[in-house]
Image (cartoon, grey):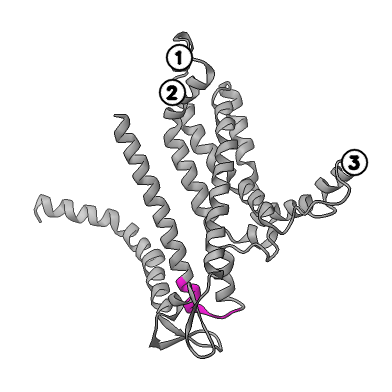
């Protein structure tokens, strides 16, 4: 065997396991989901494998009347738009809170940095289900927050803090905030803070220093944090299920309902592919904007 052939064989052996894992655990399931989305629904549960139809995709935007005609139905699109809005709101709040926290962590001494990183990652030591139940205890009508406000005389009756979009946004922000803090901290921790001192020596105020020095250097971490928060929040299931109380459905809950109680597998598969398309579109937009701004800064 020639040297070039040996190199090709060696590279194939190196990437072979990864390609096999991607094929088995990603490509094949996605292909099966796409195939199911174009099959007919078996009303007793399951799929009519011999029936090809696009009914699942039509149902995203329309519903059939008793006479078989189509009528616009925005119920599912409303749930999808709510999912996008809550995910975007979670990303914005996480950025507003995470950026100052990451800056504070990056400016501490080395011995305190490890402690602060440990405190940020500490919630991951507890199951997500338990953490969401803890928020139920905090936000319910007779929970800790309402009880404290009633005792202080600030309110006369409990505030509706649970089973609404507010509760879901709070739960999502709490769940994914570390994914915003850590990438920004990783960018700022490597920053040469003599640049900040130089900006002050050049008579820049704090806002100018943040805008012209800190934010450009933290931009890669900000982009990574936004992606890591927005994408998983878009498909969240547990937090909307518990804190939304069935009143604030997101697309993840809708998919689970179709595969569970509704027993409409084709429509659930179509929703899953639609969610995948949203995620890929979001990643593409972030990558395009990040690449454009990086090229503009060079």
Q: Which residues are magenta?
A: 262-270
Crowd rating for badge 2 (residues with CA inside 10 Å; few <14, some 14–19, many 20+): some
Whole-percent x and y of residue 295? Answer: 29, 35
Disc 1 from disc 3: Cα separation: 48 Å
Q: Which residue is mark 2?
A: 212
Disc 1 or disc 3, which is closer to the eye?
A: 3
Residue 190 colored in magenta in the image? no
Q: Choose the circle earlier in sequence order: 1 or 3.
A: 3
Q: Choose the circle earlier in sequence order: 3 or 2.
A: 3
Whole-percent x and y of residue 221? Answer: 46, 36
Q: Residue 103 has which mark?
A: none
Would you say the residues marked 2 and 1 are in contact, meaning their CB atoms lie under 8 Å apart? yes
**Residue 204, above or below 189:** above
Identify the residue at horizontal 13%, vertical 55% (top origin): 5
Q: Which residue is mark 3?
A: 153
Quarter of the image with the N terminus is bottom left
Disc 2 from disc 1: Cα separation: 9 Å
Q: Secondary structure at mark 1?
A: helix
Q: How many marks?
A: 3
Q: Nearer the viewer, residue 179 or 162?
A: 162
Residue 266 colored in magenta in the image? yes
Whole-percent x and y of residue 247? Answer: 68, 64
Q: Secondary structure at mark 3?
A: loop
Identify the residue at horizontal 62%, vertical 78% (top origin): 261
Q: Nearer the viewer, residue 177 or 87?
A: 87
Crowd rating for badge 3 (residues with CA inside 10 Å; few <14, some 14–19, many 20+): few
Identify the residue at horizontal 29%, vertical 29% (top origin): 298
Q: Which residue is mark 1?
A: 199
Q: Most prominent secondary structure in the magenta stretch?
A: helix
């Amino acid at each position: 065997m020639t040297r070039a052939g040996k190199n090709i064989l060696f590279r194939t052996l190196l990437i072979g396991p990864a390609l096999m894992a991607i094929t088995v655990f990603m490509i094949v399931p996605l292909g099966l989901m796409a195939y199911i989305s174009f099959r007919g629904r078996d009303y007793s549960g399951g799929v009519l494998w011999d029936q090809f139809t696009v009914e699942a995709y039509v149902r995203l935007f329309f519903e059939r009347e008793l006479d078989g005609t189509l009528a616009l139905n925005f119920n599912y699109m409303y749930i999808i738009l709510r999912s996008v809005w809550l995910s975007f709101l979670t990303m914005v709040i996480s950025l507003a809170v995470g950026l100052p926290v990451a800056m504070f962590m990056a400016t501490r001494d080395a011995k305190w940095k490890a402690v602060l990183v440990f405190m940020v990652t500490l919630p991951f030591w507890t199951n997500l289900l338990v953490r969401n139940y803890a928020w139920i205890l905090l936000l319910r009508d007779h929970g800790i927050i309402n009880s404290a406000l009633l005792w202080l005389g600030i309110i006369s009756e409990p505030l509706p803090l649970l089973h609404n979009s507010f509760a879901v946004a709070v739960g999502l922000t709490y769940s994914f905030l570390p994914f915003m803090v850590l990438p920004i901290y990783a960018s700022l921790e490597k920053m040469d803070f003599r640049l900040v001192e130089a900006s002050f020596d050049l008579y820049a105020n704090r806002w100018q220093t943040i805008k012209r020095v800190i934010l450009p250097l933290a931009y890669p971490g900000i982009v990574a944090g936004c992606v890591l928060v927005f994408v998983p929040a878009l498909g969240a299931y547990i937090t909307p299920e518990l804190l939304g109380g069935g009143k604030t459905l997101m697309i993840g809950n809708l998919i689970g309902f179709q595969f569970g109680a509704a027993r409409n597998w084709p429509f659930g598969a179509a929703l899953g592919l639609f969610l995948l398309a949203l995620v890929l579109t979001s990643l593409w937009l972030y990558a395009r904007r990040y690449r454009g701004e990086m090229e503009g800064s060079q």
